[in-house]
Image (cartoon, helix red, strand yellow):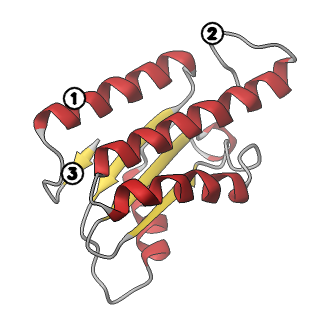
Amino acid sequence: MADTTLSLSKSDHFRLQRRIQDMQLRFPQLVMQVVIHHFPAEHPFAMYVFWLFNAASFAGSQARGKDNHALLLALDPGRGEAALMPGYGLEPLLESDALAQILDQAAPAWSTRNWTEGILGVLDGLDRLLESVAERKTGASSAHGEF
């Protein structure tokens, strides 16, 4: 969790960290990252998100390719843009339309600069999506998901 824009209060930061930890307990392979940053306007937002995801190696140097289960939520309050980028291990399981829909559901909160509620909404949507992926893979619902 990184907020270089100082858009979140300490208590909001803590709430989000706790929610991310809960998700990672449910899905032990998941490495969830949230980055709030003012990206330069010279290049497309998607390019910065792609670069950040790959440069940061959120899942660690050992988790490459199909073993990369990182998931990045990048948010630029100044540009009014957000993106979800899954690692290669999650990419075939998470349809881009479903990720776009999750982001769209956060738009009302973000339009009023309620960053925390929007992020929590995205995390809730991702949790439901990951649960459905785990159920498809295992055929049953469980407290801990595998993908």
Q: Amino acid at mark 1?
A: Phe
Give percent across and percent down for residue 88: 65, 49
Q: Looking at the image, is 65 positioned above or below residue 129? A: below
Please give left or right for residue 92 compared with residue 129 in the image: right
Q: Residues within 10 Å of mark 2 (few under 14, many from 20)?
A: few
Instruction: Identify the residue position indicated by label 1 in the image.
Output: 14
Q: Residue at x 21, y 36 (%)?
A: 12
Q: Amino acid at mark 3?
A: Asp
What is the spatial separation of the Cα atoms under label 2 and label 3, in whole angstroms? 30 Å
- Nearer to us in this view, 61 or 3: 3
Discs 2, 1 touching: Cβ within 8 Å: no
Could you tell me if residue 91 is visible in this image?
A: yes
Instruction: Name the quadrant of the C terminus.
Output: top right
Instruction: Identify the residue position indicated by label 2 in the image.
Output: 143
Could you tell me if residue 69 is visible in this image?
A: no
Earlier sequence position, callout 2 versus callout 3: 3
